Amino acid sequence: MRFLLVNPIIRASEYPPSRFPLGLAYMAAVLLDKGHDIEVIDMNMNRLPEDELKRRIRTSKFDAVGITGMITEYQHVKYLSALIKEIRPDAPIILGGSGGTSVPELMLKKTQVDFIVISEGVDTIVELADALERGKELKDIRGLYYKGKDGKIQITLPRAPIKDVDKIPLPARDEFDFEKYIQPSNLRIFNNKARTTNVIGSYGCPYRCTYCYHQLFGYDFRGRSPANLIAELRMLYDDYKINGILFNDDEFVMDKGRVHDICNEIKKEKLDILWGQNGRVNLMDNELLANMYSAGCRVSCYGIESGSQVILNEIKKGVRVEQAKEAVLKTWESGMLPHGYLIIGSFSETPETVKETVKFCHETSLIGQFSFMTPLPNTHLYQQARQMGRLTQSDEWLLERWGEWNEKLITNMSLIPDQELIDLKRWAEKQVLFGNLMGNVWQHMKIIKMRNIVKEGVVLAKRWYTRSYEPAGSVPA
């Protein structure tokens, strides 16, 4: 079969995009591996005007369309599917990624998508392609939602997570404008010539944080073998001159023995790369940090979320404030730069708990980014918010706004008035971004050159001043 693969716009305000679309590139790889032909339209990178997009669709030769998308890309998926059906009503449209997995029935009802591949789709898409090509029955393909001939939604049995993730072929980067995605990242403060891309080294996370979305990769941690992962890093280093890697794993350090093996292999292979990863504060120790640093790790990101134990307990983070503080300080001591993900607006949030978070950041010299607590579908937080009456909007109303979750207050989980919560967030960001960067220059100078501190300050300033945090829209009656 001939597939047209389309990568939607993730966020209109973010250009150029910072992450290569690994999910769609993996789909491309498995389809190519099975002998199918593909063509890619990367709207997120190329932002084609509508007339050019229509021309590309008309002139492309394809039998089916594959679209990837997160829940935040609903509006663009809706637009793309309608546009494609207008030009090629005969071509089935398949949606994969967290967007379809989150609310599959709603997606099938509100968009022109015909099939939704649920959760990990590399096996499902191959079976679906074979069924469409040969006219076979669909009911035995696991992990699929689709519109039946009578228009009713059909649901097949769920597909088990892939146990041997080494069998998944490497993403087909050559089918995309990959060079455009090779950009500076936060590794630039260590090497301003870093050519950086993102890689995923493991799937799943066993922790039960209430706000976290687990429907795509599940709770079962499955790590690629060190040999398999190093082979990809070697290929990127040799073929694309990549010397910066950002691991997109939910939890890179889940298996510490495996991480030690990966670090040892990087050194054995003499891969001259810098890298960053998402860690977890209760898993970090001095030995692990030292080995990671010696293998090129320079940035360790942590989901700190809050400096208040009340909030951490509420969101079932499973850690203590003291553990988080110890991990951040150990990271500084190792020579790495710690970075924090912070959330404001939990159910029990108060001005005092926000001040505790700011105090935590001051005491650890941590720089981090704040997001509003936003309930995503199929999360425990979402169910809590519905039950508590803190989330009253319809799913469709939310779908149209979820793409703004990091920039606007979509729905307020706390009892703090909207404008006060917005003001608290801006105050906290100012304190953490500028207060810590400029107030603790000595701490950063141990790791980062002074000129790079100034450059990073400029980047943070631009990010902060250009953001808009007004509410995303009034609650419908």
Image (cartoon, grey):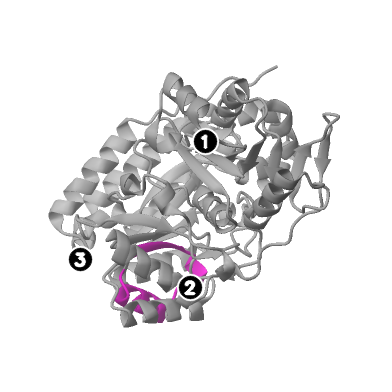
The answer to whether residue 366 is left or right of residue 254 is left
Under tag 3, what secondary structure? Answer: loop
Q: Residues within 10 Å of mark 1 (few under 14, many from 20)?
A: many
Q: Quadrant of residue 407?
A: top left
- State the quadrant of the N terminus: top right
Instruction: Residue under label 2, please give it.
Output: 228
Q: Residues within 10 Å of mark 3 (few under 14, many from 20)?
A: some
Instruction: Residue under label 1, please give it.
Output: 405
Q: CA distance from mark 3 to mark 1?
A: 35 Å
Q: Which residues are magenta?
A: 275-296
Residue furthest to the left: 451
Instruction: Residue under label 3, please give it.
Output: 446
* Residue 142 or residue 422, whichever sits in front: 142
* Residue 181 or residue 140, whichever sits in front: 140
Under tag 2, what secondary structure? Answer: helix
Q: Is residue 281 magenta?
A: yes
Residue furthest to the top: 477
Q: Earlier in the sequence, mark 2 or mark 1?
A: 2
Cβ–Cβ under 8 Å for marks 3 and 2: no
* Residue 357 or residue 26, whichever sits in front: 26
Which disc, if any, is residue 159?
Answer: none
Q: Is residue 391 above or below residue 22?
A: above
Q: Amino acid at mark 1?
A: Trp
Front disc: 3 or 2: 2
Q: Position of residue 65 (x, y in %)?
A: 60, 37
Q: Amino acid at mark 3?
A: Lys
| Residue at image point 58% right, 42% down | 2
The answer to whether residue 278 is left or right of residue 385 is left
Q: Position of residue 419 (x, y in %)?
A: 49, 26
